[in-house]
Amino acid sequence: MEKKIASNKILWIFAIGQLGWSILSGIISNWLVFFFQPTTDEIAHGQTAYIPQGLFLGLTAIGLITAVGRVFDAVTDPLIAGKSDRLRHRLGRRIPFMRIAALPFGVITVLLFTSPINESENAVNMIALFVCAMLFYLCMTAYCTPYNALIPELGRTQNARINLSTYISVTYFFGTAVAYLVPNIAAFFMTGLTPDEALQHFGGQAEMTSRFGETITQQIISGDFTVYSNYADAYRITIGILAAVAVICMFIPAFLIDENKYADTTPTETPAFKSLAATFKNKDFRTFVLSDILYWVALTLFQTGLSFYITVLMGLEATWTFPLFAIMTAMSLVCYAPVNILAKKLGKKKLISFAFMFFAVTFLVTGFAGIIPIPPVAYGIMVAVLASVPMAILGILPQAVVADISESDKITTGESRQGMFYAARTFAFKMGQSVAMLLFTSIATINKEVPIGEAGYGLGYRLTAFIATALCLLGGFVFFRYNEKGVIAKISKTTDKTED
């Protein structure tokens, strides 16, 4: 049966699913460590340190759990992709996974923040957190890997592919933005203690903690510091509400899109890891993945170091981190429409190669922060605006490139393995992120003890920006070897035959 070309309406319905899972992913990325490894200030406000806070082999409990979760997440990607590619079901190969995984994905996100024992540093809470974290990453893979595999199926023409990549980039941005609002929404559910209740809550310990030159006792009495009776519960209520919204969003494409109308639902017969090996035999895909790993190592170095570049190198207050991040993402959104138009006219390869080089310039400029005599705020805005351009390009087009390669490979081999291509890409960039975290945490310690104003202050952070520069340049040169003309020609030739 001839498959229909998905309309823009269908593409937007599909993109709503990304809005849902990006909310859940953003909640975990931004607030899991914040919730389980609270600062002294957050504990003073009423939060509880539910899991052990000490170090084990140089790692915190929450750090170890998230690291193991990431590895588990990467390993399950090809397993789920293989099962999805081989699935025989009346609804198709992807939709059944999305329908089954959406609700558990949302429920597990809420359970991650619900400790069974309401006391500090309890080992049972740590075990529960570990189990829930593994289930979270499993559910995320079970939804997102089949979801991504539908991208080349729904975007069967070059224009549709670029449009779809743009739409899901927009919904991803908004989903991440919603996740950033967790503390703002939680504030509406928090119940503050009266000054007398707060002082009774602390006992004599309030005198031991000072903030801005005053003890907490003094701040409570003056009304400048509030202690909440339900701090953790307010976060849990908020996360529960957002998770419900996210699940509804994830259900929308799972129930409103008929996969059989738009996608090739013929299952492959190749086992998962054999299929993964076959995927990496594709020369164009290997080129793309190598450049993608270099990009993600560089980007993760930059994103992890952003707050340090702002506070240490530029000398701004930490409160400037969010406004500058907001400028960067807002400007990036403004660039989405031009990127969409230019990609159709110039092709994806030229824009992505340009983005690599532009990002390298951005990282280089960041590395010289505090050395070039420009006012710190102006310097921060300049870096944010520079970063927005390559972020827009690399936020949209790589997904479309994977779709091109997987479609071309399907024509060559006769096997429809879109799920495995996206899983292989995900596996690779997650490994890149892990490498970046190891690099950053090690290099950032260089000259860490040097006081402000002395030679070498902030050298470790500066080096991470320069390393990101080199990696981005290398990634651009690697991607320049990608044979876009050959891939597109193969797809176009088959499309022309189909139309004839």
Image: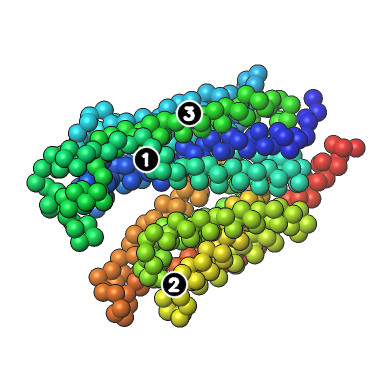
Q: Choose the circle earlier in sequence order: 3 or 2.
A: 3
Q: Which mark is residue 244?
A: 3
Image quarter where the C terminus lies is: top right
How packed mark 1 is, by other alpha carbons closer than 10 Å (few <14, some 14-19, many 20 or more), is: some
Residue name at image x 51 percent, y 49 percent: 428
Inter-mark Cα distance, 3 to 1: 19 Å
Q: Which residue is mark 2?
A: 376
Q: Which residue is mark 1?
A: 187
Q: Amino acid at mark 3?
A: Ala
Query: Mark 3 and 2 residues: CB-CB less than 8 Å, in contact?
Result: no
Extreme residue toward the top, this view: 90
Sequence-wise, which precedes: disc 2 or disc 1?
1
Q: Amino acid at mark 2?
A: Pro
Question: The residue tagged with tag 1: helix, strand or loop?
Answer: helix
Q: Residue at x 44, y 72 (%)?
A: 376
The structure residue drawn at horizontal position 13% and vertical position 39%, both measured from the top left corner, is 200
Residue ranking furthest to the front? 222
Name the one closer to the observer, 58 or 284: 58
Q: Secondary structure at mark 3?
A: helix
